[in-house]
Image (cartoon, helix red, strand yellow):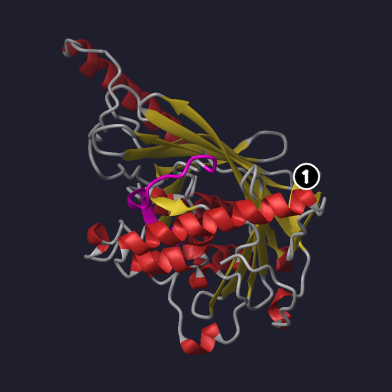
Amino acid sequence: MLGLLFELSKITMPVIFNEPLSFLQRLTEYMEHTYLIHKASSLSSTTERMQCVAAFAVSAVASQWERTGKPFNPLLGETYELIRDDLGFRLLSEQVSHHPPISAFYAEGLNNDFVFHGSIYPKLKFWGKSVEAEPKGTMTLELLEHNEAYTWTNPTCCVHNIIVGKLWIEQYGNVEITNHKTGEKCVLSFKPCGLFGKELHKVEGYIQDKSKKKLCALYGKWTECLYSVDPATFEAYKKNDKKNTEEKKSSKQVGNTEESDEMPLPDSESVYVIPGSVLLWKITPRPPNSAQMYNFTSFAMALNELDKEMESVIPKTDCRLRPDIRAMENGEIDLASEEKKRLEEKQRTARKNRSKSEEDWKTRWFHQGPNPHTGTQDWLYSGNYWDRNYFNLPDIY
């Protein structure tokens, strides 16, 4: 899941492994396809709304594709805000815990049509050549006009070839989206790539009503697109596809079956569109200079922009003001490295001083409490950020 690459909070990684964004900015990339939330709000059918929410959940992880640079670990108390009038939302995030690293965010529609919030705590496992990040934490989307709440957790993200070779990313696991008002669920399976790469990037699943009757099938690739189709049509296609695959397999003599960590080449880049399907979401192509810019999308390229007007209103904890990230963006790698070390040391010293005086860290914009829809522990927005009345903010940079 987003930006979970090497969340090695206990190890200092050289700055060359980074991309010039904080993880708080990276998770803001969930919002790139906010139009899907606005579209969901405008629909009268609950199944069609769920289709748009599912498309939003898949699109939210699409910016991960080929993003092998590690975002900077946020400092405790670091914040980030983004207002996009053109996309109809504003967002605030805060690093609410350092050990374990937890980032909380809260976004709202500028027309009061939705609220989207959550917190992410990346749980890491190392497997020799790869690192797997399981994003603990619930995503909650409320469509206010329909008085509906949807919740889900993101898929697991795995980065391969962390020691040698070309880094590549896959996402896998089940994502279950629940509509708490109707009991409808969308169960999506993000496929692991498998031995021959046939399943690489594939996503498929069903929307079902509360009695588990399948209402529609969804399929596509998280790097590309998502379609919906009638369940019976989908199952007939799957059955036929399986038969063809088995025939192909029996005619091929399988040679080396040793598991490789090299990126498999997918059978074909695009998704086969089953007749009768409806397109729910398609990725925006990346700009031509993306490969030279850490594989950023156009949305990501604008996240660290700072003008004089903005500088006069944002709090001093906003990561646009963070000197190591700014130095890296300006191509000053040695300065970025020195600043990163200085900030990490400053954070350690502040923590030691707090433990001496037995003073607890107080989060500023979020507090812990039960998620109103799932009952699980969550980080909830405390309010008042946009009043622009910032005082007693920690000196973290």
Residue at (57, 63) in percent of width and height: 37
Amino acid type, callout 1? Gln
Q: Is residue 84 above or below residue 104?
A: below
> Residue 221: percent from the left, percent from the top?
38, 44
Q: Is residue 97 above or below residue 390?
A: above
Residue at (55, 52) in percent of width and height: 51
> Total marks drawn?
1
**Which residue range is magenta in the image?**
9-22
Q: Is residue 24 shown left or right of residue 383?
A: left
Residue at (49, 71) in percent of width and height: 320
> Residue 197: percent from the left, percent from the top?
29, 29
The C terminus - image quarter = bottom right
Mark 1 Cα-neighbour bin, 10 Å: few <14, some 14–19, many ≥20: few
Residue where numbered disc 1 is placed? 377
Residue at (63, 58) in percent of width and height: 45
Quarter of the figure with residue 81:
bottom right
Q: Is residue 170 shown left or right of residue 356?
A: left
> Residue 11: percent from the left, percent from the top?
49, 40
Q: Nearer the viewer, residue 294 or 85?
A: 294
Quarter of the figure with residue 201:
top left
Q: Nearer the viewer, residue 173 or 243?
A: 173
> Residue 373: percent from the left, percent from the top?
78, 49
- 6 in the magenta segment: no
Q: Which of 34 and 287 is in front in this view?
A: 287
Determine if residue 52 is in view: no
Q: Is residue 143 shown left or right of residue 288?
A: right
User: What element does badge 1 sit on?
Assistant: strand
